Image: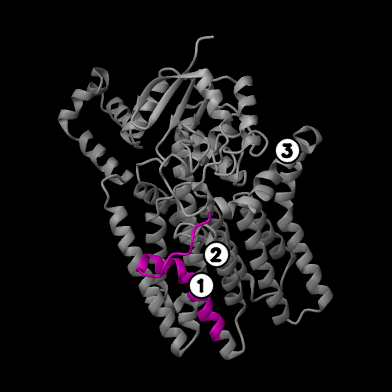
Amino acid sequence: MRFLNLAITIGLTPVIFLMGTRLLDAYDEGIIATGAMLVSQGWIPHIDFYANYGPASFYLPAALAALAGGDQFGVRWADALLRAITVVYFAVSLKLLIGDQYLRKPAFWLPTISVLLLLASVRFHGYPLFACMAIFFPTAAYLIRNAAGELHVETLLISGLLCGLCALFRYDVGFYQYVAIFIYYIHLTQTKAYALKDTLSKLAIFSASAALLPFAWLLYLYASTENGIGLSKFIFDIITWPIENYAKFRGLPLPLLNSVSVFVIYLPLIAALLVIVDSIRNKKISIFQTLLLAATLLFYLKGYVRISANHILASLIPAILMLAYAHVSTKGFVRHTSGLLLLIFLTSTIKVATVNLTSGITIFAHFRKSVAGYFNEESNDTLSPRASSNPLARANEHYRRMVNQTFLLNMNRLNAITYLRQRVSRGDRFYSGLPQHQKIFVNDVMAYSLLGALPVGRWHHFDPGLQNTHAIQAQMISDFKENTPQYILLDATWENHIEQNDSRLFSGVDLLDEYLRANYVVDVSFGPIFIMKLKAQ
């Protein structure tokens, strides 16, 4: 069975990869791609560059980039692998919950197909939530498989280590997974009538195991810098600043429930309410429903502030598993309602998948056209004489071109990157910012990865409430003086983007703008993108 799961995962990974969009996302995907490039150069998250994700979010794609031939490929292959793992272990968890007798019935294939379509079509590449789901569902399958027997130390240690691993991708979601499983263990120990002392000892083992990997990472941050400043930077990035500012600068209002797509955002809450009402009515709840209910509600906290279908994915998929289990294990109203909700979810995912997967800008469409071109004799004209006369060399050169041309940028961004590639070498210092830094939404973080250039300093990834403050701009100017780049990119694409939060406000701080105006001059522009060159001294 493990071999079959591995085989299916390996088979699904390239399928999901090919279904991805060719368009590169300058910000969210750029954060991961550039972070992967930086850690491959020896930079350490939090110490050397600002990061609001865990270290594994960068080290995994960095490792795959070394094999796949570039930071963008590393991000996409890691992303596809993690989505494939989630689909496979969602199906494994569902099979363990409902039994083999349902494998050929809608109770199994309807939710499984829905999750596959959703994960194959969501265009939010590199998002660490996919890693967290790829850890949660194998953990859930492991717990379900071992729930019938004695609660061994091995089970506690493995489930705890997986929580810690999840935290290395996203600290908050790893903590939520720990709490969900903690609640599950409390229910399980009560069901098995463990003594209080025995229950506490088992919970302590689980908690210590869950803390091991995050503690080792924090110890590394502390030991890697003088006076433990690395730990202080981590606390600022992950605790101090987000608690004080994230909701204020990134929060979004709850959307009105006026469409099927918006309904999906509220589906986890509806599913949770359905299970809670059923458990109150029957005065009992299974240990598995406890696990899934806790995970659904806790993971929903991740997306609650900046709520969207993408941000609640980690809650949505456990909710689908919970509904499928409820449909099989209950009767009457709950059974029928859970089935109806699963049908609505399938309908919405088919709609999204049909639009995204049939798009002409999927990687699959690009490779299909490229392969067709290989078998077209006219394509020989585009290859070197040596390659066109040698079938193997011709195939290798065609594949290399096909790979190098896989991803797309909009025309202005492509022209800017092409221009800079002739002037900025890999490893050079570079800066990707905004024409004015008093109001910030996002910046082009992907530019660093595409150029192979290193940021001027720690603050390459913009967040409103950070780089538009006096203290951070003063640090950035100091970084400019220490690591002066010859060229910088200032992108006005998002200047008029307005959200219903404080990111729409101007801070009034223009220290950095004055410094850049005094030291750089416009070299060339491509639409809203300005390439600035250091003034002659």
Please tell me which residue is depicted at 34% across the width and 66% down the height of the picture.
Answer: 348
Outermost residue to the front:
508
Q: Is residue 99 visible?
A: no
Give, as a three-letter code, the residue at label 1: Leu
Q: Which residue is mark 1?
A: 269
Depth check, front residue: 58 or 194: 58
Q: Is residue 17 left or right of residue 153?
A: left
Q: Which residue is mark 3?
A: 230
Q: Residue 78 magenta-drawn?
A: no
Q: What element does badge 2 sit on?
A: helix
Outermost residue to the right:
197
Whichever of callouts 2 and 1 sits on the residue coming sooner in the sequence is: 1
> Which dot marks residue 292?
none
Please tell me which residue is depicted at 53% across the width and 52% down the height of the picture.
Answer: 250
Magenta span: helix, strand or loop, mainly? Answer: helix
Give, as a three-letter code, the residue at label 2: Tyr
Q: Quick check: marks 2 and 1 in contact, CB under 8 Å?
A: yes
Q: Which residue is mark 2?
A: 300
For the residues labelled 3 and 2, the Cα–Cα distance comes to 30 Å
